[in-house]
Image (cartoon, rainbow, N blue to C red):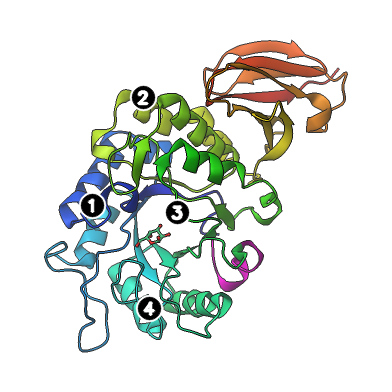
């Protein structure tokens, strides 16, 4: 299995867009090691769109933009690998990429071969400029098979924005993850709209096949390619906790070279990452909504305990949010220990339910551990 737990890494798009070059990618790889991101589990350094030249070479091969990547992709992949990390790249199932560079349509085999020769470990595969009459399943299957034919293990990240329900066929064409929505941007509205709409897709996720509600905007603070006003720290915490509960791929989107202490702490939070990477691989789902804005979500864990997210979507008011054992499938009278995943605090042993105050646009995540007797 290439992705037994949700892939973790960094992708250039959210912050850098077109402003990518080999020095940036090397610096990101360095920071992965120096700032403890690698140790926290982040592995993939992924270059998104706009790494390509406008034309293929005379053998039909994709060519990296020589101004941005003068040493070529093989050398860059070697560098990333030398740091104990994995190297990811981007292409598109249509005739052009979303930003207008050459797409892989009709070149699937040669592109897969090129990527394998460069040492690519992860391919994000987009859906712009689809030729008339070609359907998503066929296009993604073509690349899935071409990747497999190279013999190199390459994680296949399907990016067709959920338009053709890829959760139903993504795994069968060789996909390890698939986007479920349109593009995220750095705003509360975007996080909220995407994150809370994932309920109902949980049956389609599991080891080696994940729903992908798009990359993280944690730590962007309104700067970069998809910045739309930015978010507060509370909002980023809620965003990260929700993505962890959703067993979502954790692809960092901020400039990791300039993370503040809060961003660093959140992105490397052991407890939250353990929930995301739990080996059972279940995706969290909603178990209750109170007063419109208070949501309770659960994620069953491999050790028999349950991660519970108490989310407050209200912009102004602190809410008293509760979770009843009944909603978790635990008997009313069963004593359960409740521990705060984020602060580490042990709240003690409870029966029937647990409730706590949650600030506006924030989350409390607890682990509910059923006890015997
Ligand atoms: C699409 C994808 C984004 C990004 C851009 C690049 O919009 O959904 O994640 O890859 O293309 O052009």
Real-space CA distance between mark 3 and mark 4, rounded to the nearest whole angstrom: 21 Å
Q: From the viewer's perspective, is 225 left or right of 272?
A: left
Query: Residue 199 location, x and y as percent?
Result: 67, 46
Q: What residue is at 68 percent from the left and 30 percent from the top?
A: 292
Query: Residue 342 location, x and y as percent?
Result: 52, 22
Residue density around tag 1, few if under 14, some if 14–19, many if 20 or more, within 10 Å: many
Residue density around tag 3, few if under 14, some if 14–19, many if 20 or more, within 10 Å: some
Mark 2 residue element: helix
Question: From the viewer's perspective, is the residue at label 2 or at label 1 nearer?
Answer: 2
Where, by quadrant of the figure, is residue 247 drawn?
top right
Mark 1 residue element: helix
Real-space CA distance between mark 4 and mark 1, rounded to the nearest whole angstrom: 23 Å
Q: From the viewer's perspective, is 98 left or right of 188?
A: left
Residue 268 in view in this figure: no
Q: Relative to 167, is 114 above or below?
A: below
Pointer 3 and pointer 1: residues touching (CB < 8 Å)? no
Question: From the viewer's perspective, is the residue at label 3 or at label 4 nearer?
Answer: 3
Real-space CA distance between mark 4 and mark 2, rounded to the nearest whole angstrom: 40 Å
The label on residue 262 is 2
Is residue 174 on the magenta stretch? yes
Real-space CA distance between mark 3 and mark 2, rounded to the nearest whole angstrom: 25 Å
Return the residue nearer the eye: 222 or 97: 222
Q: Relative to 231, is 15 above or below?
A: below
Return the residue nearer the eye: 231 or 356: 231
Label 3, ligand 1: CB separation under 8 Å: yes
**Residue to which mark 4 is pinned:** 104
Question: From the viewer's perspective, is the residue at label 4 or at label 1 nearer?
Answer: 4
| Label 4 vs 1, first from the N-terminus | 1
The label on residue 183 is 3
Q: Which residues are magenta?
A: 167-176
Q: Relative to 33, is 106 above or below?
A: below
**Residue to which mark 1 is pinned:** 25
């Amino acid at each position: 299995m290439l992705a037994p737990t949700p892939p973790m890494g960094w992708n250039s798009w959210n912050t850098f867009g077109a402003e990518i070059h080999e020095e940036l990618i090397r610096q990101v790889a360095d920071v992965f090691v120096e700032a403890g991101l690698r140790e926290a589990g982040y592995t993939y350094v992924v270059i998104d769109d706009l790494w390509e030249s406008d034309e293929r070479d005379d053998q039909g091969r994709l060519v990296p933009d020589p101004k941005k990547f003068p040493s070529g992709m093989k050398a860059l992949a070697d560098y990333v690998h030398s740091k104990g990390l994995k190297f990811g790249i981007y292409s598109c199932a249509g005739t052009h990429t979303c930003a207008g560079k050459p797409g892989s349509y009709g070149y699937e085999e040669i592109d897969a071969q090129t990527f394998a020769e460069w040492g690519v470990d992860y391919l994000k595969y987009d859906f712009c400029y689809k030729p008339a009459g070609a359907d998503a399943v066929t296009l993604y299957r073509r690349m899935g098979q071409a990747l497999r034919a190279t013999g190199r293990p390459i994680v296949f990240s399907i990016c067709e924005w959920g338009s053709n329900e890829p959760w139903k066929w993504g795994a069968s064409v060789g996909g390890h993850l698939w986007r479920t929505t349109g593009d995220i941007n750095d705003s509360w509205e975007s996080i909220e709209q995407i994150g809370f709409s994932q309920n109902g897709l949980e049956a389609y996720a599991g080891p080696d096949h994940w729903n992908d509600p798009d990359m993280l905007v944690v730590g962007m603070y309104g700067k970069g390619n998809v910045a739309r006003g930015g978010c507060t720290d509370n909002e980023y915490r809620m965003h990260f906790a929700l993505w962890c509960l959703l067993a979502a791929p954790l692809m960092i989107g901020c400039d990791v070279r300039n993370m503040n202490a809060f961003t660093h702490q959140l992105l490397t939070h052991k407890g939250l990452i353990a929930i995301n990477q739990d080996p059972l691989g279940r995706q969290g789902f909603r178990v209750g909504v109170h007063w419109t804005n208070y949501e309770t979500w659960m994620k069953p864990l491999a050790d028999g305990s349950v991660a519970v997210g108490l989310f407050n979507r209200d912009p102004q008011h602190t809410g008293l949010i509760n979770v009843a054992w009944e909603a978790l499938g635990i008997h009313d009278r069963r004593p359960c220990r409740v521990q705060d995943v984020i602060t580490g605090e042990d709240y003690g042993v409870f029966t029937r339910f647990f409730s706590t105050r949650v600030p506006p646009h924030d989350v409390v995540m607890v682990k509910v551990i059923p006890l015997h007797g």
